Amino acid sequence: MTNHLTDALLAGAAADPARPFATTPEGRVTTRGDLATGAARMAAALIDAGVEPGDRVAVQVDKSVEALMLYLGTVMAGGVFLPLNTAYTPSELGYFLSDATPRIFVCNPARVETLAPVAAGAGIRTLDAAGRGSLTDSLPAPLPAPVARGPEDLAAILYTSGTTGRSKGAMLSHRALRSNSRTLADLWRFTDTDVLIHALPIYHTHGLFVATNVALLSGASCVFLPGFDPDAILAAMPTSTALMGVPTFYTRLLSDDRLARDAAANMRLFVSGSAPLLAETHRAWTDRTGHAILERYGMTETNMNTSNPYDGERRPGTVGFPLPDVELRIMADGREVAPGEIGVIEVRGPNVFSGYWQMPEKTAEELRPDGWFITGDLGCIDADGYVTIVGRAKDMVISGGFNVYPKEVEGLIDDLPGVLESAVIGVPHPDFGEAVVAVVVPDGSVSLDEATISGAIAGELANFKRPKRVMFRDALPRNTMGKVQKAALRADHAGLFSA
């Protein structure tokens, strides 16, 4: 038995170790051989620190090539990689660390003192944006051979937000990650001649398990950027072939006069996901560059489920067709609905997760015994087979590609003096896909304004969770059963961020 995932991801390193994998804006080139050796040394360091097969390694670090080595090294050591958003506050991290009980927690050296109290007994190691820290100060000799792991063993846990209860840790197997990356590399025609502009974060499934894994499997190289930078992306386009981004990337690039057909002439593929892409953005991009953005649909529990075609019409407002090895159906009232009818999307395939960490009851609610996963997304399939997402059965907000759990934000607002109740919703936003908006009902005991609410909760939430606007009203709309009608609130404020 081999190490199912990293054997596949690093096969190219053995075949051609001198081939470049990542080039940073500073001109640092990491070859595939460098990456494999660095990962093997990370694996050895983790094993020396006590990591055994199945142990979690939690990571909240800045994007760097060394952070990728840590991801690969964790899996090579038989561990389970747990990436955490760099924007999470100590109070937010405390939940994830106490729930996942990692053996090792890796963080930025500057945050050790702040985060040590919430480390939940994990051994703390450090890694900064330059790839330096206690983890890399004295790396041992490379691990001679990866720890054997099979297709169903866990490779990663990613926490995903819902609309009720606690955040859930989606358990992702070697099989799920390897199969989905292979499918996408083939479907999107990636080869060793491609140069991918990698500007996504690597604590998220899009940047780590789509962009990074696809590049590794296909032999492609990357322009490895620390984050979204329009100057760097436009500078890279003449010598690159592909970009993966969230809708925010495309709306911001469209606002730059330098974006034109000649700037994108060498590019062959622009992929968008993690949040809804407005049809108007799709059309504007085609007008400016001559390229149609390829939109796809996925989620933390499944990685990617559908994609618009590489060849053929990339239809604005849709997420294309189910992937070749993914089954998709639309269900309502226990039956599969007819084409054009709206229902809850369910998917089944090798990409589907193994369940929620330490939540067997929640797993049983959403993952059927026969393998069908109930996504909670509402959608339909048209007569041509294109899938369209029309909303969510639950009220999660996706802003800039990140999931926001409304109840978490509402709880903080409701606890403030002068607040009777609140409702947090997502409304269309030209840059973020959806913007978080809080609708607040004052109780009249103190004077409230938008700045007061925003300032009071800012220190408790990552920036992407904070409301872009706070609106006030005398009462929240409710149905006859007393449930707040968030659909009505979304309709009332749908034009809040329109031009």
Image (cartoon, rainbow, N blue to C red):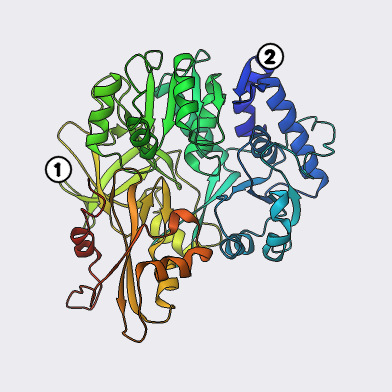
User: For residue 481, what is the image quadrant?
Assistant: bottom left
Q: Can you identify the residue that label 1 sits on?
A: 340
Residue at 46% over, 65% down:
361
Q: In this rendering, does residue 374 appear at all?
A: yes
Q: Which mark is residue 18?
A: 2
Residue at image x 37%, y 23%? 258
Where residue 75 appears, as percent x and y from the top left, is 66, 39
- At 31% from the left and 85% from the top, the residue drawn is 444
* Left or right of residue 185: residue 494: left
Q: Residues within 10 Å of mark 1 (few under 14, many from 20)?
A: some
- In the displayed structure, does residue 336 sit left or right of residue 75? left
Q: Is residue 434 above or below residue 466?
A: above
Q: Residue furthest bottom?
A: 445
* Amino acid bearing label 1: Gly
Image position, residue 493 (x, y; %): 22, 59
Q: CA distance from mark 2 to mark 1?
A: 51 Å
